[in-house]
Amino acid sequence: MRLRSLLLSAAFVCATPALAATTGSFTGATANLAPNDPAGQWTRQARDYANTRYSPLTQINKKNVGRLRIAWSFSDGQMYGHEGAPLVVGDTMYVVTPYPDIAYALDLSKPGAPIKWVFQPNPDPRSIGKACCDKVLRGWAFADGKLIYNLLDDHTVAVDANTGKEVWRVQLDDVTKGPTMTQAAFVVGNKVYVGSSGGELGTNGWFQALDVKDGHTVWKAMTNGPDAGALIGPDFHPFYSFMQGKDLGETSWPPGAWKQGASAPWGWVSYDPDLNEVYYGTSNPGPRVPSQRPGLNLWSAAVFARDADTGMAKWAYQFTPHDEWDYDGVNENVLIDIPWQGARRKVLVHFNRNGFAYTIDRTSGEVLVAKPFGTENWAKEIDLKTGMPVVNDAAHPIVEKKVTNICPPDIGVKNWNPSAFSPRTGLLYAGVFNSCMDLNNHIVQYIPSSPYDGMEMQRHAGPGGNWGEFIAWDPVAGKRVWSIKENLYVWSGAVVTGSDLVFYGTMDGWFRAVDARSGKVLWSQKLGSGITAAPMTFIGPDKRQYVAVYAGVGGGAGVIRREKGFMPGGNTLYVFSVDGNGIGTGTTQLVSQAGAAAPVSVPPAAAHN
Amino acid sequence: MKLVLAFVLAATPALAPFAFAQVTADTPNPFDGKPDAVEAGHALFGQMNCAGCHAYDLTGGMGPDLTDASWLYGGKPGEIFHTIAEGTPRGMPAWKDKMTPEQIWQVVGYIQSKKAN
């Protein structure tokens, strides 16, 4: 096994750029695709534990991708932003709407993929007013015959995947105080990993492992505060000295300020089965006005590696110490292995809001590469000796004074929208933002259940005038391989396939297929709303490959809702196949054999925010 | 600011708008035509974190736009007062325990100043 992987590595390393353009790897990077689900299934948001979003499927390829047409579609009736990817387990597809978090099982074996069952959890409507960035849900999980997901009102719920009946529901926080839950639950074995949201609400962020059987908390790690609550003990070894010491989650803040310091882990979770560690990031510190919280503000804007069974921290790395610009650290951590100075290194790749793409040794927390992947001017570089950014003096915010042209703005060079990694090309593929802000800070007071914020911003497009791009990234060299300019932020996820096709969507409603090697756009289809969700691909019961994506613009993308081309909200899942063929199409009178009716309730003012 | 408060305190016992229970949808803003009150409302809009949801320019974000013609809970001054005082079923906090009726009217005045109602 070891010899085989060494040989494979050698083969990849030998690939020249010229060869890579057609067949080999650009970088020699590989990934462990555990749990190695059947190729046609998509049972977790990122498909694998490593968060690659790589599908080995090849039926849809460069020759026929131009013939992709809609096979069927499904509108779920809810108007908030749609962000998650459908799951396909066996002959059933599972989708969950944004608030009010209604789950649908769709029967892929019947014409038109009719509704098999509907589950309405009826979350507390007061959660609407507490969610910072639209009333979204970034994904859902399948495990042990259950669909498991978070509700906006701070519950996690498990639903019987066959019947749609609730199996368990646990309350994890008090939504009336400010925290919400929008994160995509992530399952490994008998544990489901969930985190809190609320970086702008003066919350006290946490991450926990629940038992898949009954939802009880197995372990819970606070982000901030004393080491005991943060599950920081003798096994904790941050690589850089600025993070070494006792109770830094408490002492790197003004007295008591950590309790409203947010640092909410609302993003993606990944898992390394060999190291048995989970990896996840934490949000901005609260309040967003840095002068009100002198200190490093650990463990905000950081990534944690933790023992998956005990939750005890192994290492952490704070990307943006004493964050001054709302650069959350919650984006996905893609676990890959790279050739590095003559050896293989287990790393995680992380596109941070702050504009740097980090390649970090995931066994130690050592930063190997940290290079800008888009427009940024807040830092000159990341000093790899200290692990700290070298901050540009002109980028510091000032209370009651406008500081102009800080890049990126709060929402970053990339947000939660997940990238994809291909073990064939050795590259990552990500939707990114090109923008800057004029920033005026205001002192804020902490008032429970209201925002603890203070940033007044005007955002504008960066150099070139285009708000967005879709890029291919070399995580070893720390450089772009190609990029595609887009008018608006590219806030969709990506999926890359075994036929070297990458799929992504734009905020003005174009769903595209791209040659993963050259960046050439091979197919585009205009959908009914902007795309801020993650696409996926699967094999149906008819043995045919499909590609699916939600069009329902929303979430944080709403910050540029007044730009030309920004589309109305939507809620339609589009499913594509070659020529639009499938069980859901035909020349005869097809009929639905549905198992349930959809609920009729639509929030009366859902489109208002 | 201090002058406005002094006026308000002196005037309170005589004016129905300054008792929560007596404000109706049709109660006019007692500070109509008083720019100082609008300015006080502007300051409160930041101090009480209203801007965190509705934005410093009132065009919304986490919460609804307050400058357009669309009102979820009514756009008359008395209705806006009631919404601020009592909060909403959709998660806006109730402010009657944190602001006086005078302060809420000032915030209403500031909101009105951004859009003719």
Image: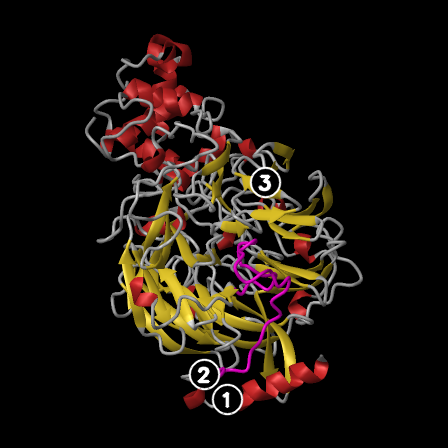
| SS at badge 3 | loop
Image location of residue A460, percent across then percent down: 29, 59
- Identify residue type, mark 2: Thr
Mark 3 Cα shell of 10 Å, populated few (<14), some (14-19), many (≥20): many
Q: Do the numbered discs 2 and 3 sit on residues whose CB atoms are within 8 Å?
A: no
Please tell me whether the stretch drawn in magenta is mainly helix, strand or loop. loop
Which residues are drawn in magenta?
A23-52
Residue for badge 1: A15
- A236 to the left or right of A415: right
Quadrant including the N terminus of chain A: bottom right
Image location of residue A118, percent across then percent down: 49, 33
- N-terminal label among 2 and 1: 1
Residue A10, image quadrant: bottom right
Q: Which residue is the extreme one toward the front?
A: A588
**Closer-to-camera residue (B102/A68):** A68
- Identify residue type, mark 3: Ala
The numbered mark at residue A161 is 3
| SS at badge 2 | loop
Q: Do the numbered discs 3 and 1 sit on residues whose CB atoms are within 8 Å?
A: no
Image location of residue A513, percent across then percent down: 35, 66
- Identify residue type, mark 1: Ala
Q: Do the numbered discs 2 and 1 sit on residues whose CB atoms are within 8 Å?
A: yes
Please, which chain is the residue tagged with disc 3 on?
Answer: A
